[in-house]
Image (tube, rainbow, N blue to C red):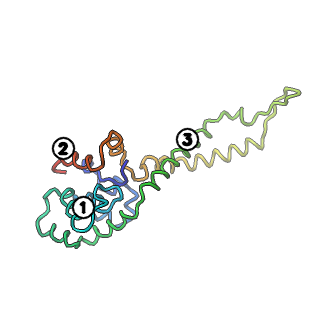
Amino acid sequence: MSLFFPDQSSKKTYVEQYPELAEHQCFKELKGNEAMFVWLYASKESPFKDEQGVDKIEKAFDLAFKGKEDYDTKNRYLKNKFPEHVRAACEKMGEFDPSVRSRALETAKKMFANMVAIGSLDISDLVNHKDEDTGEVTVGWDDMSKYMTTLQKVREEMPFMIKLLEENMGFNMKVKGQVESGKSIHQVVMERKRLNPNA
């Protein structure tokens, strides 16, 4: 599972892949392989997260741009003179915390399961009360009213929860499967570059 990992095999733009990023103008302005550079340079999950200075820039640049950019562009990057939107995107990317989001995603999954469970309750079990002495069954109108109020709240919140889970809180689940198979994020990135050198 990798937070905001750019899927270069996708026909979608970076902000189309992760609609949450569209809230920040800098991500909308990223062109071509700039999104991959931003991720490799600034993400807390980057294979280069422990690198420093020019070495970090060069490794992220070479892997992201694959030699497609001219010498002058690379030289500007190595001097830490990124385009303003790239610099802003790097700063923002560095603020995202994958561990917090991962825990929040698991919580959201549990909340969704609880909402489904509430909607699936058999109302007769919930609101019908059987008197132990007489065996008479009565309807608990108070309980029914509370249940219907809760059900209405679930109905209102369900579309938001579905959207949240469909977007995976910014995690790229394709990368998750590859990483869980024993590959590092770096291996995933390198394999994608090898298989799709023109991406």
| Residue holding disc 2 | 195
SS assignment at label 1 = helix
- Residue 168 position, x and y percent, is 42, 49
| Residue holding disc 1 | 34
SS assignment at label 2 = helix
- Specify few, some or many for label 3: CA neighbours under 10 Å numbering under 14, 14-19, or 20 or more: few
Who's the residue at 54% across and 44% down the image? 110
Among the two numbered marks 1 and 2 on one chain, the one whose residue lies closer to the N terminus: 1
Report the side of 120 relative to 28 (left or right): right
Among the two numbered marks 3 and 1 on one chain, the one whose residue lies closer to the N terminus: 1
The answer to whether the residues at label 3 and label 2 have Cβ atoms under 8 Å apart is: no
Q: What residue type is labelled 2?
A: Leu
- Specify few, some or many for label 1: CA neighbours under 10 Å numbering under 14, 14-19, or 20 or more: many
SS assignment at label 3 = helix
Report the side of 13 relative to 171 (left or right): left
| Residue holding disc 3 | 113
Who's the residue at 29% across and 69% down the image? 87
- Residue 163 position, x and y percent, is 46, 49
- Residue 115 position, x and y percent, is 58, 43
Q: Between residue 157 and residue 176, name the one nearer to us.
A: 176
Which residue appears farthest toward the left when viewing the image?
71
